[in-house]
Amino acid sequence: MTTWNFSSGPAILPKPVIEKAAAAILDFKGSGIGVLECSHRSKLYEPVVASAESRLRKLMGISDDYAVLFLQGGASTQFAQVPQNILASTDVADYTDTGTWASKAIKEAKLYGKVNVIASSKEADGTYKSIPKDLKLTPGAKYLHVTSNNTIFGTQLHAFPDVAVPLVSDMSSDICSRVVDVSKFGVIYAGAQKNLGPSGVTVVIVRKDLLGKVDRQIPTMMDYRTHIEAGSMFNTPPAFGIFVLDLVLEWLEGAGGIAGMQKINDAKAAKLYAEIDRNPLFAGTVALEDRSRMNVCFVPLNKDHEEPFKKLCLGRGMVDFTGHRSVGGFRASIYNAMPEAGIDAMIEAMRDFEKSNG
Amino acid sequence: MTTWNFSSGPAILPKPVIEKAAAAILDFKGSGIGVLECSHRSKLYEPVVASAESRLRKLMGISDDYAVLFLQGGASTQFAQVPQNILASTDVADYTDTGTWASKAIKEAKLYGKVNVIASSKEADGTYKSIPKDLKLTPGAKYLHVTSNNTIFGTQLHAFPDVAVPLVSDMSSDICSRVVDVSKFGVIYAGAQKNLGPSGVTVVIVRKDLLGKVDRQIPTMMDYRTHIEAGSMFNTPPAFGIFVLDLVLEWLEGAGGIAGMQKINDAKAAKLYAEIDRNPLFAGTVALEDRSRMNVCFVPLNKDHEEPFKKLCLGRGMVDFTGHRSVGGFRASIYNAMPEAGIDAMIEAMRDFEKSNG
């Protein structure tokens, strides 16, 4: 039986990537030693980091005005590291509060400068079901921080705000899933463990001219300039994670690049949402226009259907499709690596469940 | 031909660990999904972190007074994170300068409190060949920071100083290679990529009563208490790295634990140093009493022998045995996972080289 992995992250990776990663652990490039065991400064490994950077630059259209870094600590570390590097203590930054991760980013930024939460879609019960539009920025704001996709609640910013200040975005759960105009951004950061690779690698894309302007001493490892100067090799990088990320990017090139992937993702999401809307037993949980194409959240209209539908899906090899504990119901995370057949399996289960329970 | 991997890190891992890691990438515990692809909060993965912590506690004899954390960012991040968490701005900490990494730790600590470098073995040429003894601590010092093993120069602290203040130690390159009395330490930290696993995981062992006493706000991800409360799962951990680390610890248990491993390590190092001392063509580079049992540094007495000896070793499947660029010569890193046969191969090469060039 095929297993369909709907995990929100760490998440499904392309099958050829998995096979190459396992093989490289046993023997890296015919060297007799495995990829986990070779020095990051060896001739064997060093080209991997350059390759990953070069592929990401081409795929996303990242100009030389930007540095591309492979760091550690996840997006949660970036919540502090971004303002630490680019927000002086007297500066103001605008943030939108669109979910759990956005609110954590806001909390950390307050340690470094003035933070204005210019819009929030937080509901009375603590959940979020939409993305605020028509933003009014603070005059003189240094940047506007947005979360591009809210993994937990299943909302997504389909049109980045057209503003005069640089955008800063946590793209952890939709980076490389759709075309974005990088030139609008000051910083893009993303944990790799959804669309790019395993956990333990954080991609940071930063406009270099924003750096060196804050009124504080930054610890060496937190200073983006440290890693820019050293090409992400100041200290031992998460070498295996970057290796897998490079394989994922290679796979993405072969799958039509980001524009090609976006078409596939749009079709996959449209298909699943169509069934959620058609099927009388299920309903989506968020505003139609803000639905995420990565994390499809839905609930059974009859609460008693939750367990039997879950059981049906598990019996068909579907795993990790339950909603986040703060939302309940179901969440099908359908990142780049999820094939259309996985969506078809979920749709078939919904239809069969309707037949027996409708 | 067997490959002998003398890399200083990322470094050789035990063969059974490598085989299990590769297999788990293809299919984790018969689940149909790989270990890179499962949620860190899944029933499948979550026991891994608890297992790794429990094994490390038993192996090292770590009491409940201490937290055991699996973090990201390497020892280089700990250089700042340790003082940020336990050194108030008016406190004094004593540091010994015994190598490149010690001096980096000193630099970062100065951002947080007063740092006294109470001893240094730095030579005029910037190298280090010994470990200072007879330390005189600053009255009222909060802790004494020492680097237990200096990977680059091949020196090792064979007897930790007997002091009244807690020791703080970077043990990146010799953790779990020898028995230490954890109760003497306030903090032990180590990048995993030498004796414990792949790069991208940092082990931090911290005495809990030292926390919460500094006069600063600590960003959430830098605060040890965040990770203690969340059992190293505040955000997505370096899941695969911890999985491999758990496998390494399982292997270490089977190899006689740390006391058993220490005996093997002592014998391996003694054998190689004996040949360096016997062979008229080679010499060790550091003080006899401070020689590292992990990183064995030596040079040919005739500089012209460097290239031909290197060539001979490469031809026999030995890799990554050249000294750090700041030292030159040769460095055989012989961590826990290096079998005695690897040492024998190096010794045989030295003897054969002597026969043809002596």
Image (spheres, coloured by chain):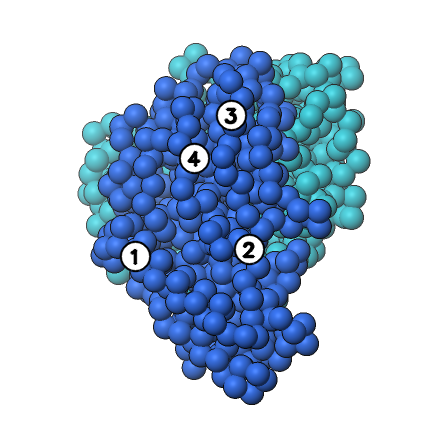
Chain colours: A cyan, B blue
Do we see residue A317 in this rendering?
no
Q: Quadrant of residue A138?
A: top right
- What label sits on residue B263 in the rendered view? 1
Q: Is residue A128 above or below residue A234?
A: above
Whether labels 3 and 4 belong to a single chain: the reply is yes
Q: Is residue B111 above or below residue A116?
A: below
Q: CA distance from mark 4 to mark 1?
A: 22 Å
Mark 3 highlights which residue?
B137
Label 2 chain ID: B
Where is mark 4, residue-wise? B161
Q: Are marks 2 and 4 on the same chain?
A: yes
Rounded to the nearest whole Å, what is the CA distance between mark 2 and mark 3? 25 Å
Q: Residue at x 69, y 26 (%)?
A: A217
Location of the N terminus of chain A by quadrant is bottom left
Label number found at residue B286: 2
In the image, residue B144 sits, relative to residue B75, either above or below, namely above
Q: Position of residue A112 (x, y in %)?
A: 64, 19
Q: Mark 2 is on which residue type?
A: Val
Circle 4 sits in a helix, a strand or a loop, which is it? loop
Residue B97 seen in the current view:
yes
Considering depth in this image, is A5 or A273 the residue closer to the camera? A5
**How far apart are the two marked residues, 2 and 1, measured between alpha carbons?**
22 Å
What residue is at 29 percent from the left and 35 percent from the top?
A: B62
SS of the residue under disc 3: loop
| Residue mark closest to the camera, 1 vs 3 | 3
The answer to whether tags 2 and 1 share a subunit is yes
Q: What amino acid is found at the position of numbered circle 1 in the picture?
A: Lys
What residue is rendered at 61% in x and 48% in y?
A: B128
The percent position of residue B4, horizontal first and vertical second, equals 45, 71
Q: CA distance from mark 2 to mark 4?
A: 20 Å
Q: Nearer the viewer, residue A149 or A25?
A: A25
Mark 2 lies on a secondary structure that is: loop
